[in-house]
Image: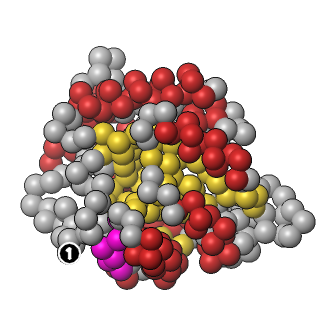
């Protein structure tokens, strides 16, 4: 336990040791994935954001070399915390960004150019890291926003993320209320990825689905299994350890899909005077997350 941890935080973390008792839902039993699947043989440690924004996440908050050195430090910490699970570093780029204005086409989103995506891929290559391209559709649709990025998914080291927070199916402006995806959307994305993977003879890819409320993902039981796509349901909420743990239990642990993810915020997690959870504490979650994202 971290020295100086508040008693409420310590109590919440200590309670994690009881979660796995009698819980047979995890790990989720699925048929075998195609050869070359990263999970659960690896744990992915990802830095999230966009190099064009200092506010969106650590990927853009720091200049490239200090950012990559900080990623090296986090990767080393996770290797120490769980030497039995190889760590895969990653850069998680928001490649389609929800906007605060409609824009010329009324979609409330902006697509990043090829040069920026290539810049992040090259940064990742200096660390033998993988890359995630993340989509915030705004008032567009995932069916319209995924196709322009498919050419990048032909690269073996590029994977995908989709953010339900900014999928504004009710017509609300992004940021005003939380958006949503249904199992049908997730299955459609899986199908597009799987067809590409089989056509190009690629190893399975990871699909990260952001979630920090229950309504963000509907009909989770209908999410299909595909041997070429590994779904990570990613707990994307910030706050004190008790808040984050309660959220994880509520809609990750209790609604099993395939793999679990967990997000750590360098700034938002410490707003209330708490300390950001450390790797050894996160590893006490049940199920153990195999995708960790830092923002």
Please provide percent x and percent y for residue 166.
64, 62
Q: Residue furthest left?
A: 22
Q: Residue at x 72, y 39 (%)?
A: 52
Q: Quadrant of residue 5?
A: top left
Mark yes or no: residue 212 visible.
Answer: no
Is 239 one of the magenta-colored residues? no
Say how the picture is coloured. secondary structure
Q: Residue at x 56, y 55 (%)?
A: 133
Is 228 one of the magenta-colored residues? yes
Q: Which residue is mark 1?
A: 31
Q: 177 left or right of 7?
A: right
Please provide percent x and percent y for residue 281.
27, 35
User: Which element carries disc 1, helix, strand or loop?
Assistant: loop
Q: 60 left or right of 211?
A: right
Please provide percent x and percent y for residue 76.
32, 27
Q: Residue furthest top?
A: 3
Residue 176 drawn above or below residue 194: above
Q: 193 left or right of 83?
A: right
- Label 1: how many residues lie within 10 Å, few (<14), some (14-19) or many (20+)? few
Mark yes or no: residue 80 visible.
Answer: yes
Residue 219 drawn above or below residue 202: below
Relative depth, front residue between 114 and 142: 114
Please provide percent x and percent y for residue 258.
30, 66
Relative depth, front residue between 268 and 200: 200
Q: Quadrant of residue 250?
A: bottom left
| Range drawn in magenta | 224-231
What's the magenta bit mostly, secondary-structure-wise? loop
Q: 78 left or right of 273?
A: left
Q: Residue at x 39, y 70 (%)?
A: 201
């Amino acid at each position: 336990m971290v020295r100086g941890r508040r008693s409420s935080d310590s109590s919440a973390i200590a309670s994690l040791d009881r979660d796995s008792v009698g819980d047979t839902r995890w790990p989720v039993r699925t048929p075998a994935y195609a050869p070359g699947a990263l999970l659960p043989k690896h744990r992915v440690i990802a830095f999230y954001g966009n190099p064009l924004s200092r506010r969106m996440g650590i990927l853009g908050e720091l200049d490239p070399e200090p950012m990559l050195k900080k990623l090296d430090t986090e990767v080393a910490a996770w290797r120490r915390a769980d030497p039995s699970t190889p760590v895969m570093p990653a850069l998680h780029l928001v490649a389609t960004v929800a906007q605060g204005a409609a824009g010329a086409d009324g979609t409330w989103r902006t697509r990043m150019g090829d040069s920026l995506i290539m810049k992040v891929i090259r940064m990742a290559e200096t660390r033998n890291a993988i890359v995630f391209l993340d989509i915030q559709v705004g008032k567009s649709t995932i069916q319209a926003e995924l196709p322009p990025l498919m050419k990048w998914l032909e690269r073996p080291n590029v994977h995908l993320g989709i953010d339900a927070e900014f999928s504004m199916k009710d017509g609300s402006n992004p940021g005003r209320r939380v958006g949503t995806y249904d199992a049908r959307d997730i299955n459609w994305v899986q199908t597009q990825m799987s067809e590409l993977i089989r056509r190009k003879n690629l190893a399975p890819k990871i699909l990260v689905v952001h979630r920090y409320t229950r309504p963000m993902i509907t009909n989770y039981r209908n999410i299909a299994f595909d041997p070429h796509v590994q779904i990570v349901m990613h707990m994307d909420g910030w706050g004190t350890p008790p808040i984050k743990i309660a959220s994880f239990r509520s809609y990750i642990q209790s609604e099993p899909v395939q793999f679990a993810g967990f997000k750590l915020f360098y700034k938002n997690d410490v707003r209330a005077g708490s300390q950001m959870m450390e790797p050894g504490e996160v590893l006490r979650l049940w199920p153990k997350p195999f995708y960790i994202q830092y923002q």
